[in-house]
Image (cartoon, rainbow, N blue to C red):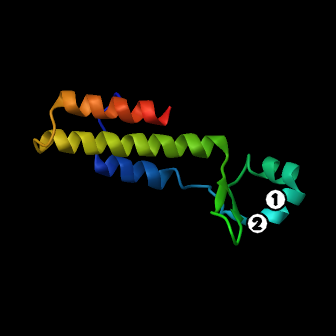
């Protein structure tokens, strides 16, 4: 992130972005399989949790929500980097290298 953000800024950002969000719909894997087109369409508007007794859970998210979560994570890592430099735990060069590595892993 190019702008400086603090812990309080991150808390305010996440709180303000909760407005208007609906609760997650929960369906079974077999329900998803039987109505795939319907649930893929629904997932463009709200998150859907898919449960399965023998597999890990899956969450389908609207793309805008996925992008918002990535922004929150980026802000979190920026705060961690800032605190590490403030406390002498890492140099600006080390922080830049680690953030670049993290960005490359996510890509």
79 shown above or below 60: above
Q: Residue at x 67, y 46 (%)?
A: 62
38 shown above or below 74: below
Q: Is residue 30 left or right of residue 103?
A: right
43 shown above or below 104: below
Crowd around label 1: few <14 · some 14–19 · many ≥20 (10 Å): some
Q: Residue at x 74, y 50 (%)?
A: 43
Q: CA distance from mark 1 to mark 2?
A: 7 Å
**Which image quarter: residue 78?**
top left
Pointer 1 or 2: first along the chain: 2
Q: Secondary structure at mark 2?
A: strand
Q: Outermost residue toward the right?
A: 34
Q: Outermost residue toward the front?
A: 54
Q: Which mark identifies residue 27? A: 2
Residue 31: x %, y % from top left: 84, 64
The residue under label 1 is 32
Q: Nearer the viewer, residue 19 or 57?
A: 57
Q: Secondary structure at mark 1?
A: helix
Q: Nearer the viewer, residue 87 or 20?
A: 87
Crowd around label 2: few <14 · some 14–19 · many ≥20 (10 Å): some
């Amino acid at each position: 992130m190019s702008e400086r953000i603090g812990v309080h800024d991150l808390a305010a950002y996440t709180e303000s972005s909760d407005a208007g969000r609906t609760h997650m719909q929960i369906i079974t894997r077999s329900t998803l399989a039987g109505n795939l087109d319907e649930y893929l369409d629904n997932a463009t508007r709200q998150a859907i949790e898919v449960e399965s007794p023998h597999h890990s859970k899956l969450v389908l998210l609207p793309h805008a929500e996925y992008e918002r979560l990535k922004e929150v994570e980026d802000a979190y890592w920026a705060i961690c980097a800032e605190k590490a430099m403030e406390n002498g735990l890492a140099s600006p060069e080390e922080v830049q290298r680690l953030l670049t590595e993290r960005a490359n892993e996510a890509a």
